[in-house]
Amino acid sequence: MMNTHYDTLLGPIYSWMLGDVQAALVRSAAEIADMHLPPPELGPAVDLGAGFGMHAIPLAKLGFEVTAIDSCQWLLDELRSLAGVLPITVINADLLHFRSHVSNACSVVLCAGDTLTHLPSFASVEHLCGEVAAALAPDGIFAATFRDYASKTLTGDARFILVRRDANRILTCFLEYGADTITVHDLLTERIEGEWVQKVGSYPKLRLAPDWVESKLQAAGLTTRRETAPAGMVRVVARKQI
């Protein structure tokens, strides 16, 4: 299960995977500025799959009241530490049920960092599109960034990816392609008390085609545009018409 994988393997090292956390927050702030979001006065913001707050913190610094939802307690604890007194409500919950945690129409709903591909099925993505459309205020925006695993299939040795390494830790992943999903196998090797210790785990991701995601958002009544996001991701931005 994805939650277990993050709780036991990726969650404790997620900040290390990204390197400099403060630099990552600066990059995310620039990414958010590039989305041309509506003003905070329109309503609160929701960050789905918030992690340690890479997008929730810049949103709060812009003046948004932010509800940050994730299911990995490791990351949420780090978010609380980094957020300080910023107006961020941190919730450990299934992001598919986010509407039960917000009471006002939202100006922004964000689902960044490949979170969308972590959902359990295509039906759950379609369900989320409908929930987002219902939650947005008129002129509100939903923005999702994700990797396009649908249009390209890596083969052979290209399926082995070195995520990061230093003197005491190495993280490599291997991608196994199926018809509708891609299974990510993570291999973590750490030096602990002078001994190398290995941990392994795997989880599925959906092979979401950007055209398909846009079609589901449009079917929910939103207008969409597609953009190039950092780290080779696709960004789909959907707006609720006034």
Image (tube, rainbow, N blue to C red):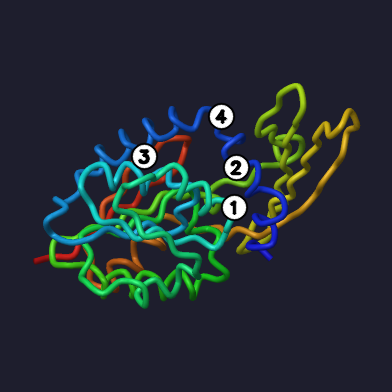
Give above or below for 22 relative to 77: above
Residue on which the image places disc 2? 14
Mark nearest the camera among 3 and 1 is 1
Q: Secondary structure at mark 3?
A: strand
Residue extending farthest right: 195
Q: Who comes first in sequence, dot 4 or dot 3? A: 4
Mark nearest the camera among 4 and 1 is 1
In the displayed structure image, the side of residue 88 where residue 20 appears, left or right: right
Residues at marks 4 and 2, CA–CA distance in whole angstroms: 9 Å
Residue on which the image places disc 3? 228
Q: Who comes first in sequence, dot 4 or dot 2? A: 2
Q: Amino acid at mark 4?
A: Gly
Residues at marks 4 and 1, CA–CA distance in whole angstroms: 17 Å
Numbered label attached to residue 19: 4
Q: In the image shown, does 33 or 157 lie closer to the viewer? A: 33
Residue on which the image places disc 1? 74
Assess disc 3: are there few (<14), some (14-19) or many (≥20) residues with their C-alpha within 10 Å of its C-alpha.
Answer: few
Instruction: Look at the numbered discs 4 and 1 and tell me whether their residues touch, using CB distance below 8 Å.
Output: no
Instruction: Look at the numbered discs 1 and 2 and tell me whether their residues touch, using CB distance below 8 Å.
Output: yes
Residue extending farthest top: 167
Assess disc 2: are there few (<14), some (14-19) or many (≥20) residues with their C-alpha within 10 Å of its C-alpha.
Answer: some
Q: Amino acid at mark 1?
A: Trp
Q: Amino acid at mark 3?
A: Thr
